[in-house]
Image (cartoon, helix red, strand yellow):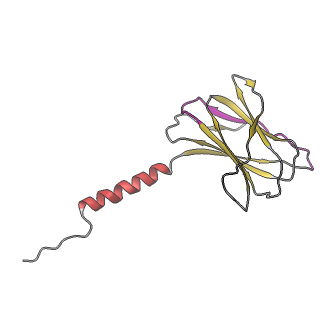
Amino acid sequence: MQKYYSVFTTKSFLFYLFIFFTAANFGQQKSIELNQQFGINSGVSKSKAFQIDYKNTSPFIMLSAYTKDVVFDDVIYYRLMANETWEDWRLLEDSHDSEIYDRVVFGPAYIEQAFEEIQFKTKNPSNSSFVFRLFFPKFTKSISEKKK
């Protein structure tokens, strides 16, 4: 009597299962995207204050931003409200790590404290739409964007 061997053994099944759950786990990182339109016509150089419920439940938050306005040639600042007090404006550095042709990238900046709100500004508003991204490591327990 001839025995049939399956190519899909228990070891290979466990290996593929491990790969699947590892990929699914990395896909569960937490992030919040905040959209802001600065504009010449409106003179808007400061964003609204975005309420974020962050209780310092991870070692850091990574802040980055980008605009598809490739001729944008200004700086971006951000500030945090902690304990109902606005802190000083901080520079969000222009990223010089790589060549990206379809956008201007800023950051990363690492935030290592609890805060209630975050706000952004630029000195010379253009008709630039920005996406600000707050990235939280997957083990961050409590985070949500509050709508005003």
- In the picture, the quarter occupied by the C terminus is top right
Query: Does residue 7 lie above or below 12 as drawn?
Result: below
**Residue lying at 61% horizontally and 31% vertically, measured from the top left:** 112
**Residue lying at 76% horizontally and 50% vertically, measured from the top left:** 130
**Residue lying at 53% horizontally and 36% vertically, measured from the top left:** 140
Percent from the top left, x then y, of residue 86?
Answer: 76, 26
Closer to the camera, 65 or 142? 65
Q: Which secondary structure type mostly characterizes the magenta part of the structure?
A: loop
| Quadrant hosting residue 82 | top right
10 lies left or right of 114: left
Q: Residue furthest left?
A: 1
Q: Which residues are magenta?
A: 41-60
Percent from the top left, x then y, of residue 5?
Answer: 18, 71
| Quadrant hosting residue 48 | top right
Residue 64 falls inside the magenta stretch = no
Percent from the top left, x then y, of residue 38?
Answer: 83, 47
Closer to the camera, 126 or 71? 71
**Residue lying at 52% horizontally and 34% vertically, measured from the top left:** 141
Residue 53 falls inside the magenta stretch = yes
Query: Does residue 107 lie above or below 14 as drawn?
Result: above
| Quadrant hosting residue 134 | top right
129 lies left or right of 27: right
